Amino acid sequence: MSARPPFTLPVTVRFSEIDVAGVVFNSHYLTWCEDAKVGFLDSIGYDPARFAAEHHLALVRHAEIDWVVSLRPLDRAEIRVTVDRVGTSSFTLRHEIWRTGADPALTASCVITYVWFDTLAGTKIPLDEHVRGALSNA
């Protein structure tokens, strides 16, 4: 979409996120992506309080994850979020999870489509012009 740098959220792998193989259990990647989505939306003017006041949410419609390299306990990483697509009632974010430090590497990429949801009506709705503009300019 734009040439702006991605939104980034730093992460330090905690021991509680590690599975029996000694690497991050896969479901934690989606948790990190959710945290990064919330931070990204906040950075473009859509914090959780605004969602509550306007009775809107961005709900996961579809998620794809490609794992490349495992993260281990105490690794430091950052989730880089960019807008891939803005549709009529949905948008797609790309979350790249990069190990940082002495041996940087792309560890996973998560492409997630979110649907714009009206919590009062209980249904998806078209993106309003304000959120559409904010996403398009991010």
Image (cartoon, rainbow, N blue to C red):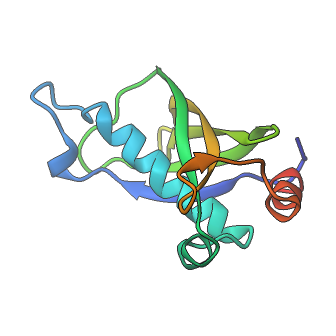
Residue 100 as seen in the image, left or right of residue 25: right
The one nearer the camera, 37 or 68, is 37
Q: Which residue, as the protein is rendered here, is positioned at the far left?
A: 20
Residue 53 as seen in the image, left or right of residue 125: left
* Residue at x 34% of width, y 47% of height: 75
Residue 105 as seen in the image, left or right of residue 83: left
Q: Position of residue 26 (x, y in %)?
A: 31, 30
Relative vertical location of residue 57 with respect to residue 33 in this rendering, above or below: below
Callout count: 0
Q: Position of residue 80 (x, y in %)?
A: 62, 47
* Residue at x 41% of width, y 56% of height: 11
Q: Quadrant of the N terminus?
A: top right
* Residue at x 53% of width, y 51% of height: 122
Residue 109 visible in the displayed image? no
The one nearer the camera, 8 or 47, is 47
Q: Quadrant of the C terminus?
A: bottom right
The one nearer the camera, 81 or 44, is 44
Tell me the quarter of the picture where residue 131 sits: bottom right
Q: Position of residue 32 (x, y in %)?
A: 42, 49
Residue 130 visible in the displayed image? yes
Q: Position of residue 25 (x, y in %)?
A: 24, 33
* Residue at x 67% of width, y 57% of height: 7
Residue 112 as seen in the image, left or right of residue 11: right
